[in-house]
Amino acid sequence: MNGRTISRSQLAALVDDLVGSGVGVVAPVRAPDGRLDYRPVARLEEAVLDGGLPRLSLKSLFLPPTEPLFSFRKSGPDVAIDSVPTTFPPRLVLGAVPCDAAGVAALDKVMGWDYRDELWFGRREATTIVSVACGKGDASCFCGATGNGPAGTRGADLLLLPLDDGFAVEVVTPKGEALLSAHAGRFGEPPNEADVARRRAGLLEGRVEPVGSLAPVTAWLGGHFDDPVWDGIALRCHGCGACASVCPTCHCFDIVDEPEGVTRGTRRRNWDTCQTARFTLHASGHNPRSVQDARYRQRVLHKFSIYPERFGELLCTGCGRCSRACPGGMDLPDVLGAIAARAAAPAGGAA
Amino acid sequence: MNLYEPYRVKIAGLVDETPDTRTFRLEFLDPEVARTFDFKTGQFGEYSAFGAGECTFCIASSPTRRGYIECSFKTVGKATTALRDLNVGDTMGFRGPYGNHFPLERMEGSSLVFIAGGIGLAPVRSVIWNALDLRDRFKDVTIVYGARSVSDLVYKRELEEWAARADVRLHQTVDPGGETPDWAGEVGFVPTIVEKSAPSATNAYAIVCGPPIMIKFTLPVLKKLGFADDRIYTTLENRMKCGIGKCGRCNIGPVYVCKDGPVFTAEELAKLPPEF
């Protein structure tokens, strides 16, 4: 680790400093039902660091479930457009789970290719992400298989590793370095290397992931669009899209106009999901993905074949939320395992 | 201003092509945009009636005609119904131009064979006028256009204009049963008429757009006539929202219709998964 340490009391003071200077601090907070949600906090005591996976990922901080793109006012034949801001107040996420931070970084690619999404990057630039290494994985987690891991730094500006009193601090990006420099007095000496190594290893202790390396899956998927493995794959899928809502990387959206009376309205961007039949339905009635198997295949291909081909990385961080949320019991690691088995079959998985 | 905010355009003219298909001529309200706006033939945009949402069409006019763009649309859903409720002088939204284009620059010095069915003539019309406005750069120009019935033929005045030109060979057809007593054109499906008119494939490109069934049966005919797959171009219309590669809706396998297309060669289409 290239960094420093910070005690719990100094971290609490850092949060006070930041909140006092107008920075919005967002952290996992215990909801009345016992689960965690990323929420604004005023003090460190409200936050639960290393408490496991929050209900929803960080995605909604950068791509809100619904957001205005602009408003319009009609007056006779004329229309005036009122823009929305593309700059955002400074914000710090404290206690991001590494798989959630990785999801945000993965989405930078699609939000920035060719056309730069100012709303996404406006929020990205205003936000510093401090991840806390995760020691609370469960049976649905497979972050290791996606290349992230419980102490993954992808998408984080700083990574905190829990020590006995406080944290070891790893600087990941210049933005993280800037935060550290601006509050240098709050941070202590570099941590004991042996202690850090022991605790890192401890994060992985006893972890058995539900699926192995995804490299063979990714390699096989591209050429097997019509493989029998897809036939009936979505029999248990209700097409509800819960998987996409909880996913840190599912980013498909709809653009709709919401009239407010006759003369005013707002064009909004709303989360959408490729799992519903209407997603690709043409006005003519033609639907390129007319059955659920095809829609589920799209979800798997997008994450493990299309995105890697176009952007060089998986569109999955292995958080396992989709498996936990599915009312039909669809389990992505199971499906990936079945595909891996198919890819490894003696026939070479030939269709 | 963000990239989902449209240009405001004023409807400068409208033509009812058929009972359910209308063409708008659109002029940009912002004089700077009006002066600088440029596109290439085959590119598309997102058109919107404020309050009803956006819909995706190719730009139906030619980039050689500056100062305005045109779009032709059939009234089918919510957004196109709202567009139809607009009138000359009304303001609507346009985002674009997006996507790739028909590589007309590569086709210079060659013959062009345009094949279209129904409202599929809209994107092809852009290429036709683009080529005709630069007529001396191309050899033979052949147009095969068909619709279900005489009343479903779009751009009727332009069909007359093309028919009258000595430097254009136009074959018009309607499906059997769609003819009127005074119909002077062909009767038969588009692929049949393509086969019958047998345009030469020598140093030629084919540009095809129409309903999927028409394209499906036209491609083998073109092959028989000697057109190589990489000299047959078409344009796809998958459902889109953003038009700029983000909303995740239009992809066919790894190919994003909005960014890699909408223009593809038959060779490229053959490599895609059958999901369009």
Image (spheres, coloured by chain):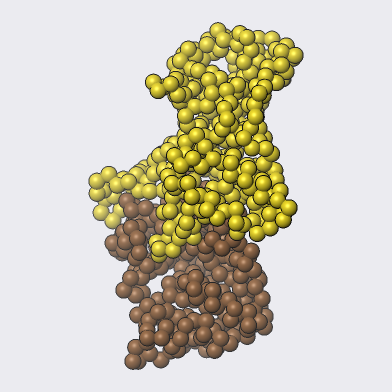
Chain colours: A yellow, B brown
Q: Residue at x 51, y 31 (%)?
A: A58
Residue A103 sits in quarter = top right
Query: Residue B275, how many percent across, how many down?
Result: 54, 61
Residue A173 sits in quarter = top right
The answer to which of B275 and A2 lies nearer the viewer is B275
Q: Is residue A66 left or right of residue A305?
A: left
The answer to which of B106 and B32 lies nearer the viewer is B106
Query: Residue A37, how many percent across, how many down?
Result: 45, 25
Above or below A251: residue B197 = below
Q: Residue at x 49, y 81 (%)?
A: B190
Q: Residue at x 64, y 26 (%)?
A: A207
Above or below A40: residue B193 = below
Q: Is residue B39 left or right of residue B83?
A: right
Query: Residue A44, how many percent across, how many down?
Result: 49, 14
Q: Quadrant of the N terminus of chain B?
A: top left
The answer to whether residue B75 is visible is yes
Query: Residue A124, how many percent across, how many down?
Result: 54, 33
Above or below B27: residue B225 = below
Q: Residue at x 47, y 29 (%)?
A: A55
Q: Is residue B42 left or right of residue A242?
A: right
Above or below A220: residue A118 = above
